[in-house]
Amino acid sequence: MNSLVQIDGTQGEGGGQILRSALSLAAITGRPLQVDRVRGGRRKSGLMRQHLTCLRAVARLCDGKVQGDELRSPQFSFQPGTIRGGDYHFDVGSAGAVALVLQTVLPVLLHADAPSTVRITGGTHVSFSPSVTSLRDSFVPVLQRMGAKVDLKLERYGFNPAGGGSILATIAPGALEPLELVERGPLTSAQVGVVQCSVPKNVARREADVLCHALNLNPERARIETVESQGPGNALWVTLLHGEHTTVFDAVGMKGRRAEQVAKTLVRRMQRWQHSGTPVDEYLADQLLLPMALASGGAFRTPPLSQHSRTNMDVIGRFLDVGFEVLEESERAARVDVRAA
Amino acid sequence: MPCTVIGLYGTVMDQGGKRRWDRWRPTLSIFQHPDRIVDHLELLVEPRWLRRSQELVNDIRSVSPETQVTVIPTPMENPWDFAQVYGALLDYARTRPQEDDEELLVHITTGTHVAQICLFLLVESNFLRGRLLQTGPPRRGSDGPLWDEIDLDLSRYDALARRFAEEHAAANQVLKQGIQTRSPDFNRMIEELEQVSALSTEPILLTGPSGAGKSALAKQITALKRRRGQLAGPLVQVNCATLLGDKAMAALFGHSKGAFTGATERQGLLRAADKGVLFLDEIGELGLDEQAMLLRAIEAKRFLPLGADVEVESDFQLIAGTNVDLRQAVSSGRFRGDLLARIDMWHFELPGLAERRQDIEPNLNFELQKFAQELGRQVAFNKNAKARFLRFALDPASPWTGNFRDLNAAVLRMATLAPGGRIGEDQVNAEIGRLQRRWGGSIPADPVAQVLGETPIDRFDRAQLNEVITACREHPTAAAAGRALFAHSRTQRATQNDGDRLRKYLAKWGLDFAGLNQASKSR
């Protein structure tokens, strides 16, 4: 079982997700990992700063040994050790996303010998990454339903480019249980939230108006908050509660993009999901693959799977004896069944 | 290898404030690259800005927790004061411990050019052993701010280095009139002269025997300066030996109208050379009064023409030529010491033609071409004729007392007399005779040729044999000649049979002492 896993960094979608999933799984299974042609498909190939942070973080959790952990390195190998619970602090530079580091270390610490706290500082609401809001309100509750003793607090917002946000996760070790998320329950609550720091005052209001209009909500009910942060920034989200399950759609405001544009893009994504009739949105689907594989079972329904998710399944399959059965139900929906092989 | 960046806190661009994250900040941008990690920043801050810079330090900690920031108070009160800025940075660079295993980057970016130049100098002079890191705001269409590492090893910039070399080579060629000279000493002198002429407007002193090419060189220096756009005025040249008595003063410095009976205004050579070059050949022949005036004219760039009430100005580059030893002239009181000190700032000694025989052939070809151009008809040597002339010209026995003047005259004569544009052996032999007569009785005809005729002989042996023949003619006996020839080595021998050693050497060439000694007496 402890045989080397070799991964070609150019396979499938070829991005950083391959590295993060592989690192978590190597630590959990104790199998040594070697990755060649790291991010080979990208214009700037090799390990970037944020990948190094993940690599070194996982190595610290399990006292692992790493070779090739240098910037722009096209290849690295990782020899995991024993996973230790404890109090950890990881700093992500250049407003890198704390969510990506949390996604990597969280499954690992579920397999530790003792409870842990993990503080991660950096960007909490930045582009090209899940927001901490969606992890806290959507992903973590699903993990809790799978039996994980996990809690996540957002301590301080961090936006691009200043960073400086902070989250605190508490994780107690324990096995994950299979969960089925196949039916979408009735909508019981819809909320709109916008946060801002040092951006023109009307930006948040305009974003909230677009979101409320799309949900037929009274604009007064939107929660608009001015927050403290290292630098300026703005984030917005919609939280939808269907039965027991919460779905979050979010976005970050960007300099040079109109507030209405940002909000409308979010709305279109939300509506696509609403029309699919499935309970799990496409981002959460990707996040659930690893925990469900660790639980050796489970099922969910979601809009058609992204290339990202398919690559992720391949990587998981290299470490764990699980099978993913994907049934394309229609153009809008797919069903994924996870089974022990 | 850990990476350290050294940089200045910019009081404008690095400044904080509410909208600081909307702007590009040079120092912060170093830490915003997803594929770069800087382990250590040494931030040089003028003490006045220590508090203000704290905001930047905090921001760096936020975007780059990997980086350790050290703030170094560096007094540079006036960022435009070169001496102050360079002094402060040099103090810092000197006292900074340099690690062998660190990658050092010195940050240059927008800001005062004074600081940029000082940092450049410190890297270039190796006080800071690193590379320059140039940052700039993101360019349109690029995905991040500029990061450019510059290695000051100029040899890496081949194209640049090649252009430098070509420029120097071209300048050398101007000075050499395009003649492919081979004498290493002469070529080295030309290289130095090329640099001096580019960088200096101080007087240049050219010494060397008459005919060594001083005026030709003065002309070429002028041409080179003109080519580089360093001259607006003409080349004015005069041989000081031709300036005699009262006329010398007026010719050089001019005179006003009515300075003496019948005098109309005259500009004078110094004023004619304004913004140009004044070449004073045989400067040693200048009178003492004229020397005093000239010194003032060089130092103050102004002087008083004869009979005038106001000084006039003239800014010229002086090139002086001489074939006498000016130092000796100073000690005998014929030349002013202060003037010599002033004009031999750059002193170049032109060797006579006899000291650079390698250059005879290229100069021969050059003169032939010049003749062809000037007279519009081609002239060339027969192969044998050229070999004969070169053998004669390169022979150490040919003294070339008139130097290039002799050579040029010889070429001109042979070319003029060449039937159908071909210089044959007859012309060469006749010319050799002319030259030998010109060089006079003091120069015996080639003694080796006298005793051996046309027997082929190496230059090495010819030189040795030449000395031996001379000694045999000067001494009454073989023993006396031998003592003179082996004066040093004989002291280290057990037996001193000098006469025998000499006789054995002569026998190798089929010669004997009596024959040589006799021949000289009969001459």
Image: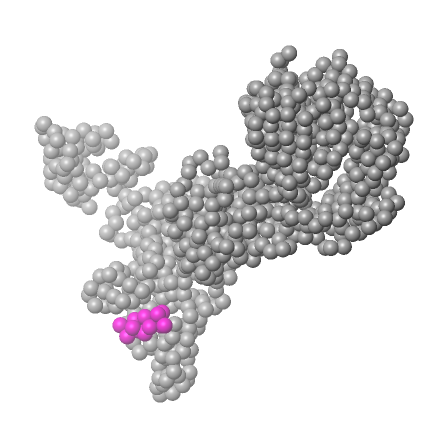
Question: In the picture shown, does residue A282 fall above or below B522?
Answer: above
Where does the image place residue A282, in percent across and percent down from the top left? Answer: 80, 31
Location of residue A189 in the rendering, given as x and y in whole percent from the top left corner: 83, 38
In the rendered image, is residue A328 in sight?
A: yes
Q: How is the image coloured?
A: one colour
Q: Is residue A210 visible?
A: no
Residue appearing at x 37%, y 54% in the figure: B404
Q: State how many labels appear.
A: 0
Vertical side of B364 occupied by B384: above or below: above
Q: Is residue A302 above or below residue B165?
A: above
Part of the protein shown in magenta: B288-300
Whether residue A289 appears in magenta in the rendering, the answer is: no
Q: Nearer the viewer, residue B264 or B152?
A: B152
Q: Tell me where residue A177 sits by quadrant.
A: top right
Q: Quadrant of residue A181?
A: top right
| Left or right: A4 in relation to B405 | right
Q: Considering only vertical position in the picture, is A196 above or below A41?
A: below
- Asked if residue B484 lies left or right of residue B117, the reply is left
Query: Which secondary structure is most common in the magenta stretch?
Result: helix
